[in-house]
Every structure is written in structure tokens, then in C-alpha cells.
Image (spheres, rainbow, N blue to C red):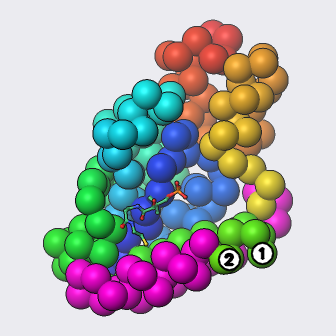
Amino acid sequence: MHVVYPGSFDPLHNGHFDIIARASKLFERVTVAVLENPSKRGQWLFSPEERVEIILEAVQNAKLTNVEADTFGGLLAEYTKQQGSRVIVKGLRAVSDYESELQMAHLNRQYGNHPETFFIMAATRWSYVSSTMVKEIARYGGDVGKLVPQATIEALKGKLLVSQ
Ligand code: PNS
């Protein structure tokens, strides 16, 4: 089965990576789909293309050969259909994620080819990690080495958020 794992991934952190690794064991093919939303462009640290590069490097480092990364715009359900998939994978960190994820799962099922959403519970050790917090900690000089894959560290160095 081919599944789509969508998100902003700005940048990829260990919680995301854990979901990717677990999905890659369950499904034949995983497409990590990076949201490309021009209206938010100014708020992003990494361009969609840079985020795809980080994801590809992380999955190559981990030898997850059935994982690919791509950017998408517009409706996720339509993108999922274009990919020939009918399953969206999402990670759930806490009960607070559930409400909006439930809403999105129901709405997504009304578009495209009516994709089902498959939830994977985030590992507890990463359940408190978010991209927003990773960026904030890095900006203030905190060590994010335990929170993100090496590929993200290298990319943060490129943005001068992590010292060389
Ligand atoms: O990592 P994020 O920011 O929580 O990911 C949110 C994402 C990309 C999954 C969500 O914003 C999305 O699916 N956007 C695509 C537009 C769309 O289909 N919206 C309707 C969903 S109900």
C-alpha cells in the first residue's frame, strides 16, 4: 500500500522521523508530502524544496528505501488521489492534536478519492517536540541535537541557527 504523510516539516524533527520510520515498516511506499503554501512563505525558515532535501537526506541516512519526499499545494485529498494513494498517515502527539485531526480526517474523506486517515501515536519520548519549539530553542542557542535528525542540524547550520 502507498501512503501519504503530509505536514509542514519546517523543519523535520525526531517525532516526524519516528512516524516516517514506523510507517515505512508498515506500508510498501511512503510519500512524505511537504506543504507548499505561498501565503505562509514569509513565516517559514526553510523553503519547501529545502525541507524536502532535509527529509531525503534523513531517510537516506537511515536507509529507508521505500520513502520519498515531495511538495504539494492545494487540497491534500486531491494530491493523495494524484499519487494513486487512498491513505493519509498522521502522527498524534497528545489529546490536543485529536480535535483538529478528527476534523481534517472527516473533511479529507469528502474530497479526492475519499482517503482514509491512519493515525500513528507519536512515541512518548518525542511527543513534546514541535518544529516551532526546535526553531525557538535553536534561535536562542540551545542544543537541539537530541530533538532532530543530523540532516536537520546540518540545515540549521546553513541558516546560522546552529554553530558550525
Ligand atoms: O505539519 P502541519 O502544519 O500540522 O500539517 C498540516 C497539513 C499540511 C497536514 C494541513 O495543513 C493540510 O492538509 N493542508 C493542505 C490543505 C488541505 O487539504 N486542507 C484541508 C484539510 S481538511
Residue 160 is a magenta residue? no
Q: Quadrant of the C terminus?
A: top right
Q: Quadrant of the N terminus?
A: bottom left
Disc 2 Cβ-to-ligand 1 distance below 8 Å: no
Residue 44 disc label? none
Residue 122 is a magenta residue? yes
Residue 95 disc label? 1
Helix, strand or loop at label 1? It is helix
Say which residue label 2 marks. Answer: 98
Vertical comparison of 38 with 16: above or below:
above
What is the magenta range? 100-126
The part of the image, by quadrant, that contains residue 32 is: bottom left
Dots 1, 2 in contact, CB < 8 A: yes
Point 63% across, 17% down: residue: 161
Residue 145 in sight in this render: no
Identify which amino acid the numbered label 2 is placed on.
Answer: Tyr
